[in-house]
Every structure is written in structure tokens, then in C-alpha cells.
Image: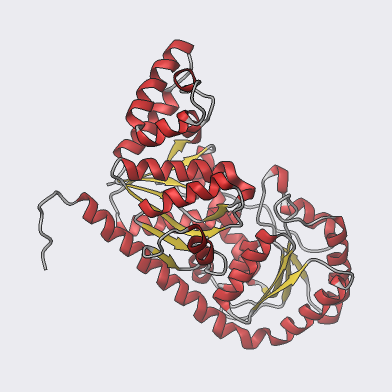
Amino acid sequence: MRILVDNSGYALGNLGDLAMLRVALDRFRALWPQARVQVLTECPDRLAQLCPWAEPLPWRGRQLWFQDGGLLRPFCRLAPGMERRLRLRAPAVAAALARTQARMRHVDWEAGAVFEEAVRRADLIVATGGGYVNDHFRSHAMQMLDTLQVASRVGRCAAMLGHGLGPISDLGLRANVAATFPGLDLITLREKWTGMPLLQEIGVPTDRVRVTGDDAIELAYRIRPCRLGRCLGVSIRVAGYSGVDGNRLSALRSALHRAAPRLGAPVVLLPISYHADESDREVLCRLLPDAEAPPATGTLMEGVEQAVRNVGRCRLVVTGSYHAGCFALAQGIPVIGLARSAYYQAKFWGLAEQFGAGCSVVRLEGDDLEDRIVQAVAAAWREAPDRGPELLAAAQRQIELGWTAYRELQERVAERRRPAGTVQAA
């Protein structure tokens, strides 16, 4: 049994991405203990820290395969879009032509050959959880969808697990979703707020779509504390796709300076992304320099678990980062989601629908933003002890749905691998 795993962050620099990936890998190992699991990454050393038994698959190999204007261009230069059509409709031919061109141009094709073999020999090709099938991450989404299309065309079992979808206005991306999804064996969504309507709008059949929640919920739920904490947790994401700017940060800072002393609560910073171009830690330390920052940790997996435990010290989490909210809700801790862009509004409203009243959303707009944050914090802090049981019940329900979907995928893989004419025993 061989499994090829695509994922939401090849640099492995986001703790939410890492949590989703680790839970998925743990589930694969539980269902297929002897499987060879290959994970697309550009940082093999980090993957070894996260999951020592997973095998790194060079991300550059997929780039060589799927980049437009690459090794297939000399064969397709007269027909726009021909490169992509050739890769999708005749992958074996495309691979042979790419190998030929690599030799002629003295390009190192080794990574491409490794990727080609991984696709050809895999029993299951799967994209684990993430929120990148949208306009903001178009390039990542297109290559992932193309990979799954190739898997379907060569008769492999293909699935997407734990995804958030949209917004998608780009016509090419919408067309790729509509072309890829019907050929997949299973699609699981982490929320139905935008995911299901988007699929229906595009015209994707939903008979193999399940809403299971975010895979990372299981990790946070598993190491939850036995009692509600006393800290006020804060996280924020400053990036082009979040729409958070200096004015919103200023309002948030003022609101927290007003709210925290009234609560008598220590403020704990909860960074999730450690990517150089969107470091939550750097932003949070500038925003609240006197608050408690997380300590340095050992391995990557220890860092993920420590981040979850830091969240577990809180009574309430105020966050503009989706997975800080996931980690909190899964441990019975209420969340105030801060959202400005349509992308983040969809994330937090979807999370609120999955968990109920313990997750509220504050739009980062308006002259009264500071006051609305203060009021939301006061109300959520007061109600926190009563929210825990329903949040934990929602987390448990989503974990069970996730396992049910993974077992369904296991059955589909077994059906695909079963020799033709074999009758399954009753």
C-alpha cells in the first residue's frame, strides 16, 4: 500500500497546517499500518521532526511536472493551454516528453522522475486539510487539483480531506474544481457555510462530499486540560488574504488594553504562522509587547503540541488566526473570531456553524470597532464556563465524523485494489 500526500504548506511553517497534516498521517497509519506514505514538502528535515515515519517527496518534482512554460513547452508552443491538457489527458506521454527535453537541455529531472513514479505507483493520492482552494492561493490550488485529476485519470483512488473552500471568482480555478471534484472518491469539508453552496453553484455532485470539521480538532481535543484556564489568549494574522492593516491593529490593541485589566487576566500570545512573510509572533510581540510570548521548543511536533497547550491555558481566545480558534474550541474554550476579508469571514462563520454559540465573529470594520471588541470580550468571558460542555461535545462529534469518513475512504481504496471479478465475502 502506497499513499501520496499533498498538503497545505510545503515549507511546514504553520502550526495549524502541521496539526492537520499530523492527524491525517496518524489516521493513515492506524488504517494502513504497513503503508508507505510519501509527503510533498520542500523541507524534509522539518517533516522528520513532525512525523519521522513519513517519507519526504520533493516538492520541486511536482513543479517540474506541472509548471507551464517548462519542459513541455517546445512540444506545445503553438497551442495555448496544450501543456496542461497533455499532462492531464496523457500523463505517461507528458512524462516521456519531459524526460526527453530534460536530457536535451541538461535539466536535472531526478525530482521529476521521483514524483512521476510516486504518482504511478500510489494506491491513494490525497490532499490533506487546508483552506487554499480559493483565489488567494490559486497557484497552489491549481497544481493540487491537477495532481488529483491525473490520479483519477490513471485509475488511482483520489481524495481531499478536511478542506475549506472559497471564495472562488477566478474562472480558471472554478473550471478546475468543476473538472476535478466529480472524479474524486471522497471530499470532506471542514465547514458547510461556504463549501456546500459553492459546490452546488459550480455544479459539483455532492454525493461523495461529507462535512467533518477540521482534522486538527482531534489533536487539540486529545490533549485538552481538565479545567478552564484563566488567561486571555490573543492571535492575529496580518497578510494580504486577511485584510488586517494598521488601523485594525490599533483598534485591537486599544480594546485589549481596556478589556484585560477589567478581567484581571494575563494575556497570552498565540502565534500560529511562523512563515517569514507572515510571522504571527512578530506582529503579536509588536502589538502587545508586555504580554507573554510562547517559549522556544524542540522538535516541530513539540512546537505544535506546546501551541495547543498554550491555548489550553486560556478562558477565552480572541483571534484573527483560524487555527488558534480551532485549537481553543476543541478544548472547550470560547472564541471571538476577528475577520475582515471575505476569506476570513467564511473561515470564522464556518467555524461558528460547526461549534455553535461558543464561537462569535467580530467584523473588523467601522468606527465603533474598539467598543465592539471590548463588549464581545466581556460577554464571552462571562459565559465561558457554561460554553465548555457544548463545545467539547461538538468537537467529539466532528472527530467521529472525521474517522467515519477516513474509514469510508479505506473501503473505497480496498474496492479499487480488489482484482476484477473478486467477490467480497459477506
- Quarter of the figure with the C terminus: bottom left
Q: Is residue 142 above or below residue 70?
A: below
Depth check: give the residue in front, 212 or 333: 212
Q: Residue at x 50, y 21 (%)?
A: 77
- Spot occupied by residue 105 in the image (x, y as percentages of width and height): 48, 12
Please report the residue visible at 62 percent of the width from the left and 49 percent of the height from the top.
135
Q: Residue at x 43, y 28 (%)?
A: 112
Describe the colour scheme in one phrase.
secondary structure
Can residue 214 be seen?
Answer: no
Of residue 363 and residue 88, the one placed in the foreground of this image is 88
Count of numbered labels shown in the rendering = 0
- Please determine whether, in this image, residue 147 is positioned above or below residue 379: above
- Horizontal relation, residue 416 to residue 302: left or right: left
How far across and how far down the image is residue 398, in percent?
A: 46, 72
- Residue 55: quadrant of the picture: top left
Looking at the rendering, which quadrant does residue 390 occupy?
A: bottom right
Could you tell me if residue 330 is visible in this image? yes
Q: Residue 229 location in percent, x, y?
A: 67, 77
| Residue at 78% from the left image edge and 69% from the top image edge | 267
Question: Which of the two residues, 403 or 98, is positioned nearer the viewer here?
Answer: 98
Residue farthest front in this picture:
79
Residue 335 position, x and y percent, is: 67, 74
373 shown above or below 103: below
Instruction: Give the left or right position of residue 330, taking residue 28 as reference.
Output: right
